[in-house]
């Protein structure tokens, strides 16, 4: 039996598995001849782009429910290692360590939030990178309305003015009002000279107008030195009192992808060709196209690959 492994049950991984299953059905190939297996850290397909919303109840869907009537297997576990040479994957599951063989592998691990070594970030900073983190953030906000008035209670400092930070900032004024928190003060901060740096210059005026209309304060060209339970300190020593600090500053490649013995670009993304296949540039004389596939969130086009 040939085996296809898909690592990651997000949009790309799920679409790949469903597409493969559909194609095998069209070709009349039995599941006894080719198996498809998704490996995911938990049992949920998380709709990550909705994690900024106030109600994230429906922002994740049971993978088992999606796959129950299909020819796709599901393994819940944490992938510890991908052995490209021997075509095997090591997974920590609730039942112990499993080693799975494959004939084709699709790496759809996606990106993770970039968390620099800033004092207090892990202990006191919130994020909405995962469903569980977004839920913890929501629980924290619910708890604010029960707290006594204190400096920074109604202030939310969002660090990172990319798309996620902007979406969250625009949601916060109404979200605080719904919780009965008056005089909400939303601060959107970024180390760049302007917000939405990746969205192009044409978007700047529109973004700033929208933020201004919602009363959101914008701070640019700033660096965070430390974070504590009552706010953050900037590199110049300025203190911002805020009971809520949310980190949305930047993404990086999944550590498992970074550890693969293949070529990466300067952002840690794997070098691939137009078909999203891994390109092995380890041999100076020629390139090799390997039968492994990496989905866009952790890959880049092979034009960056030099031999």
Image: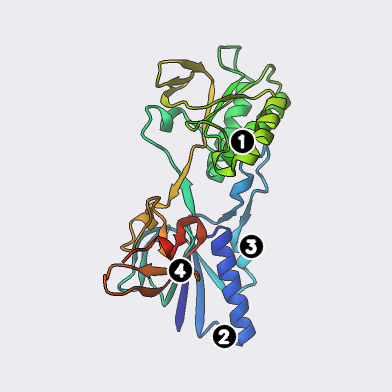
Q: Which residue is mark 1?
A: 166
Where in the figure is residue 118, as x and y percent of width and height?
A: 38, 30
Q: What is the C-alpha distance between the residues marked 4 and 3?
A: 34 Å
Q: Secondary structure at mark 1?
A: helix
First in sequence: mark 2 vs mark 1? 2
Q: Secondary structure at mark 4?
A: loop
Task: Work out whether 63 lies above or below 273.
Answer: above
Q: What is the C-alpha distance between the residues marked 2 and 1?
A: 47 Å
Report the front residue among 13 and 219: 219
Disc 4: CA contacts within 10 A as few (<14), some (14-19) or many (>=20) = some
Where in the figure is residue 273, as x and y percent of width and height?
A: 45, 69
First in sequence: mark 4 vs mark 3? 3
Residue at position x 52%, y 27% from top? 220
Which label lies toward us, 4 or 2? 4
Where in the figure is residue 130, as x and y percent of width and height?
A: 53, 45
Task: Work out whether 34 lies above or below 187.
Answer: below
Q: What is the C-alpha distance between the residues marked 1 and 3?
A: 33 Å
Q: Which residue is mark 4?
A: 273
Residue at position x 68%, y 40% from top? 55
First in sequence: mark 1 vs mark 3? 3
Q: Which residue is mark 2?
A: 30
Q: Which residue is mark 3?
A: 65
Disc 1: CA contacts within 10 A as few (<14), some (14-19) or many (>=20) = many
Colour scheme of the rendered structure: rainbow
Q: What is the C-alpha distance between the residues marked 4 and 2?
A: 30 Å
């Amino acid at each position: 039996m040939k085996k296809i492994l898909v690592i990651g049950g997000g949009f790309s991984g799920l679409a790949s598995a469903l597409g493969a299953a559909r194609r095998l059905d069209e070709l009349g190939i039995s599941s006894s001849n080719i198996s498809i297996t998704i490996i995911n850290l938990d049992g949920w397909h998380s709709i990550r782009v909705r994690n900024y919303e106030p109600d994230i109840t429906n922002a994740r869907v049971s993978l088992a429910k999606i796959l129950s009537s299909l020819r796709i297997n599901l393994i819940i576990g944490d992938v510890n290692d991908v052995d490209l040479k021997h075509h095997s994957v090591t997974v920590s599951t609730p039942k112990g360590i499993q080693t799975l063989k494959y004939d084709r592998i699709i790496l759809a691990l996606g990106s993770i939030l970039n968390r620099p070594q800033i004092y207090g970030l892990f202990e006191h900073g919130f994020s909405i990178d995962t469903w569980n983190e977004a839920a913890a953030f929501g629980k924290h906000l619910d708890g604010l309305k029960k707290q006594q008035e204190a400096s920074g209670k109604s202030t939310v400092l969002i660090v990172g003015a990319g798309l996620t930070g902007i979406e969250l900032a625009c949601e916060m004024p109404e979200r605080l009002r719904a919780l009965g928190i008056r005089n909400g003060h939303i601060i959107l901060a970024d180390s760049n000279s302007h917000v939405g740096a990746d969205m192009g210059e044409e978007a700047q005026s529109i973004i700033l107008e929208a933020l201004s209309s919602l009363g959101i304060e914008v701070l640019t060209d700033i660096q965070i030195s430390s974070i504590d339970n009552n706010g953050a300190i900037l590199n110049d020593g300025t203190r911002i009192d805020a009971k809520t600090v949310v980190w949305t500053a930047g993404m990086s490649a999944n550590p498992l992808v970074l550890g693969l013995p293949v070529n990466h670009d300067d952002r840690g993304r794997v070098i691939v060709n137009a078909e999203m296949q891994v390109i092995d540039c380890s041999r100076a004389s020629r390139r090799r196209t390997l039968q492994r596939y990496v989905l866009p969130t952790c890959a880049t086009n092979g034009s960056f690959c030099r031999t």
